[in-house]
Amino acid sequence: MLGDVERYFHFFLPLMLLAFAYYWRAFVQGLVVLPFRRLLWFGISARVLALWIHPSDDIYRYVWEARVLLEGFNPYALAPDSPSLESLRDAAWPLINHPYHPAIYPPLTQIFFGLLATVSATPFFFKLALTLVEIPSLYLLRKLQIREGAPEKVLAVFFLNPLLIFEIAGRGHFESLLLISMLAFLVALPYRSLLPSALFLSVSILFKIISLTLLPLLFTGKSVTKPVIASSLILILVVPILALTGTLENIAHFGESYAYNAIIPYLWEKVGEVCGQAQIGTWGSRLLFLFCIPWVYRFIRGKSPATQALWLMGLLLLFLPTLHPWYLLWILPFASLRLSLPWLLLTGTISVNYFVGYRFHLTGNWQEVDWLRIPQYLPPLALGIFTWLRTRTSPPVSG
């Protein structure tokens, strides 16, 4: 019988890499051009097939917290293993991840899960609903593509990305709520009034707190007064909600107790180990992040909203202490619009990381594999350096 590693590399990983290779060759390189309607139906068909993939254990958490909410309990105060919730336990209860942690998903996400559970509190229905929510994102991206004058192929680059299809329709992650609200925010940005933008960004933050990363996009114009008012309204609206529900406290506690597959924090951790000072790893990464924020903001000033979003979200991902494969969906629409090859390549190379989850489901042993960072991050890094050098050495185009 094949060992765990051999099974993974013989079946699942080659299938993922083959799908990504076709995606890269056909759509990123623009060798296949699909009319919009055909692209839509091709993408929907792929998602219908993906619905039958076994879901992530996260989705059992979604269903559980929806049931907790509907029964009148507070998921932010009671973890799944709380004795107060023992009467709600069913056959799926052992599948819930981190049962000792209370809810970390923001209130609007919990309300959405609760609404779904009133219809059907099953993983398959949740996956179906989250997939249906994702599809309108293509129409929003199309508006941005036309506005920014991007090539039409960016629609296929986004909508047919294997990671996107696998992680939402296949695994059932709720990133579709984040994608549609972030894109709605970008679509609303050019309007004279910043109120629609502020509303969409508030909704996005209440779906997933990382949308706060896009707050600087309100300051793209020359005016300062309106962006200050709009950003103040957002913070006045969302921060008390997140604080009063306990979302912020739970996220902070979860973040301190869990780290996985990080990029820059991992490198700083190794520096700390070499120096014999763990604090060097922790504080070195945080200080470097704070140093990079003003530098990146100065660099992106005056650039298109999609470019600004790409850089801001990219900076966040580089410094996150945890980087699961589906976190790359946060940057995917912006990487598609700007055809950022390193980030797009990373959506393929990160598939090798599925080995950790695959081994966990077979053996019950969750253990990070450090060397997997090499095939994940080294090819995109090399491509990024090569692209940057080629851009710097290319002669200016005369026109």
Image (cartoon, rainbow, N blue to C red):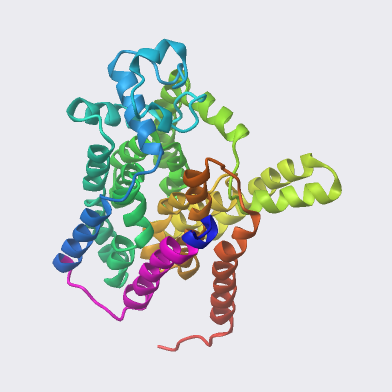
Asked if residue 154 is among those painted magenta in the image, a careful observer would answer no
Q: Position of residue 214 (x, y in %)?
A: 44, 46
Seen from this angle, which residue lies furthest top?
Answer: 84
Which residue is at the front of the view, 326 or 372? 372
In this image, 8 relative to 193: left or right?
Answer: right
Which residue shows up at 19% across the image and 60% down it? 45
Task: Tell me the chief SS of the magenta region.
Answer: helix
Q: Is residue 303 visible?
A: no
Q: Quadrant of the C terminus?
A: bottom left
Which residue shows up at 34% across the image and 17% down it? 88
User: Compared with residue 157, is residue 198 higher up or lower down, i.e. above or below?
Assistant: above
In this image, 127 relative to 382: left or right?
Answer: left
Q: Position of residue 389 (x, y in %)?
A: 59, 78
Q: Position of residue 310 (x, y in %)?
A: 46, 57
Which residue shows up at 31% across the image and 25% down it? 66
Asked if residue 11 is among those painted magenta in the image, a careful observer would answer yes
Q: Position of residue 199 (x, y in %)?
A: 31, 36
Which residue is at the front of the view, 246 or 140? 246
Which residue shows up at 29% across the image and 59% down it? 144
| Numbered range of the magenta stretch | 8-36
Seen from this angle, which residue lies furthest right?
Answer: 276
Seen from this angle, which residue lies furthest left?
Answer: 37
Indicate the quadrant where residue 385 lies: bottom right
Q: Is residue 58 visible?
A: yes
